[in-house]
Structures are given as C-alpha cells and as structure tokens.
C-alpha cells in the first residue's frame, strides 16, 4: 500500500510542477507583452512631448512679436 501512496504522491507532485511551469510561461508572456506596450507608450510620450515643445515654441514666437492681429478688419 505504501508503494501506491508513493506513486500517488509522485503523480500529484508532477502535476503541481506542470501547473507551476505553465503558470510561469503565462506570466513570462504577459511580462513580455507589458514590456512591449511600455516601449510603445514611451515612444508615444516622446512624440507628444516633441509636439508640445513645437507648439509652445511657436506660441512664444507669435506672442513675442508685438503685432496685434485684428480678425475683424
């Protein structure tokens, strides 16, 4: 009877190990996906920052000239 119990314990341990390995694979895929998304978001932040910088500098150029624009002339 002890041998049967040992086989059952070994089988349960093997099953647990397979489940844990599967969970690790899923976690690794999720981490890789999040890292890729993070890189894309960083690129988008840089793009938007450049846009803000461009718009800010153009606003400064327009505001620095002492010209007044009259829309109703």
Image: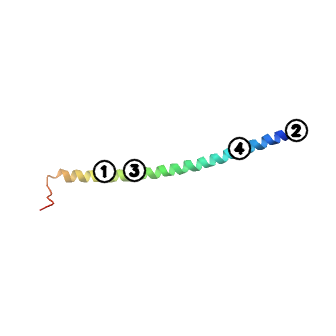
Question: Considering depth in this image, is 47 or 71 the residue closer to the camera?
Answer: 71
Instruction: Residue 13: name its quadrant.
Output: top right
Q: x%, y% of residue 2?
A: 86, 37
Which comes before the other along the chain, label 1 or label 4?
Answer: 4
State left or right for residue 41 relative to residue 57: right
Q: Which residue occupies the extreme bottom position in the image?
A: 73
Element at badge 1?
helix
Spot occupied by residue 50 in the image (x, y as percentages of width and height): 34, 52
Residue under the image location 56 percent in, 49 percent down: 30
Dot placed on the residue nearer the N-terminal end, 3 or 2 = 2
Task: Specify the color scheme.
Answer: rainbow
> Dot 1 corresponds to which residue?
53
3 or 34: nearer the viewer = 3
Indicate which disc residue 1 carries. Answer: 2
Secondary element type, mark 3: helix
Label 1–label 2 contact, CB within 8 A: no
Question: Where is mark 3, residue-wise?
Answer: 45
Query: Which residue in the protein does label 4 denote?
Result: 17
Of the 4 image quadrants, the one containing the C terminus is: bottom left
Position of residue 27 measured from the top left corner of the image (x, y, whole percent) = 59, 47
- Answer with left or right where residue 46 lies relative to residue 35: left
Asked whether the beta carbons under mark 3 and mark 2 sit within 8 Å of each other, the answer is no
Q: Earlier in the sequence, mark 1 or mark 3?
A: 3
Report the residue at 38% width, 51% height from top. Answer: 46
Question: How far apart in space, not on screen, are marks 3 and 2 (Cα)?
Answer: 65 Å
């Amino acid at each position: 009877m002890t041998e049967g119990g040992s086989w059952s314990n070994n089988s349960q341990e093997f099953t647990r190990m397979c489940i844990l390995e599967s969970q690790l694979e899923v976690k690794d895929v999720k981490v890789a996906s999040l890292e890729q998304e993070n890189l894309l978001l960083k690129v988008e932040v840089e793009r938007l920052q450049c846009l803000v910088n461009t718009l800010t500098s153009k606003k400064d150029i327009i505001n620095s000239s002492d010209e007044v624009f009259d829309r109703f002339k």
